[in-house]
Image (cartoon, rainbow, N blue to C red):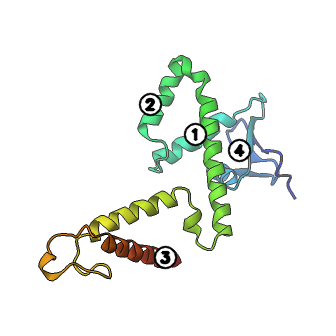
Amino acid sequence: MANTEKPLLIKRYASRRLYNTETSDYVTLEDIAGFIRAGREVQIIDLKSGDDLTRQYLLQIVAEHESKGENVLPVNVLNDLVRSYTTGMHSVVPQFLAASFDMLRDGQSKMMENMSQFPNPLAAMPGFDAMRKQQEAFMKTMMGGMPGWGSTGPAPDDAEKPSPDGDEIAAIRKQLAELQAKLSKL
């Protein structure tokens, strides 16, 4: 069984073919992308010179995916990256990008962990409570003036204007809470 703690060593021959040293076969850029997506680190070394070519090949994989329309990097981010090479910012950008992706990975793993621990996975999602409150405010706004909404609807002669009666608002809140509970169960 291969040791997944060490990076997978890929050797590039003079013919530019890439050789997987663990499985003793040739691989493509898409194979390397698959190893990385599976969580494996790779290291690509030029066989003749011993130079580490990992960065160049990873950039090539990103460029190929972007050119196929699998756009992950917005144009403004690409512009900022190009600018960072010509300004003093190029020393800060790698640490910022690494920290940003670390936070993204941590957030994804915490979300997956929370989804397995709670009966309602949406309740554990970051921002769910704020989204629920926005939904309640929207429903209150939309349903506030509707005749018959709540246990004490407006009188027939007041059907056109909403009543600021506290009991009616309490009834609406109760019904909203019941609807939210039903939605949460779904």
Name the one closer to the observer, 92 or 144.
Answer: 144
Give the structural element (helix, strand or loop) at label 3. helix
Give the structural element (helix, strand or loop) at label 2. helix
For label 3, count other residues whose C-alpha is less than 10 Å away and answer few (under 14), some (14-19) or many (20+): few
Closer to viewer: mark 4 or mark 3: 3
Kindly report the distance in space between the C-alpha atoms of the residues bearing marks 2 and 3.
46 Å
**Three-letter amino acid code at disc 2?**
Asn
| Residue at 21%, 69% in the rendered image | 162
Q: Earlier in the sequence, mark 2 or mark 3?
A: 2
The disc label shown at residue 79, or none: 2
**Three-letter amino acid code at disc 3?**
Ala
| Residue at 33%, 63% in the rendered image | 138
Kindly identify which residue carries mark 3.
181
Kindly identify which residue carries mark 1.
60
Quadrant of the image occupied by residue 101:
top right
The disc label shown at residue 18, or none: 4
Are the two marked residues, 4 and 1, in contact with CB atoms closer than 8 angstroms? no
**Three-letter amino acid code at disc 4?**
Leu
Kindly report the distance in space between the C-alpha atoms of the residues bearing marks 4 and 1.
14 Å
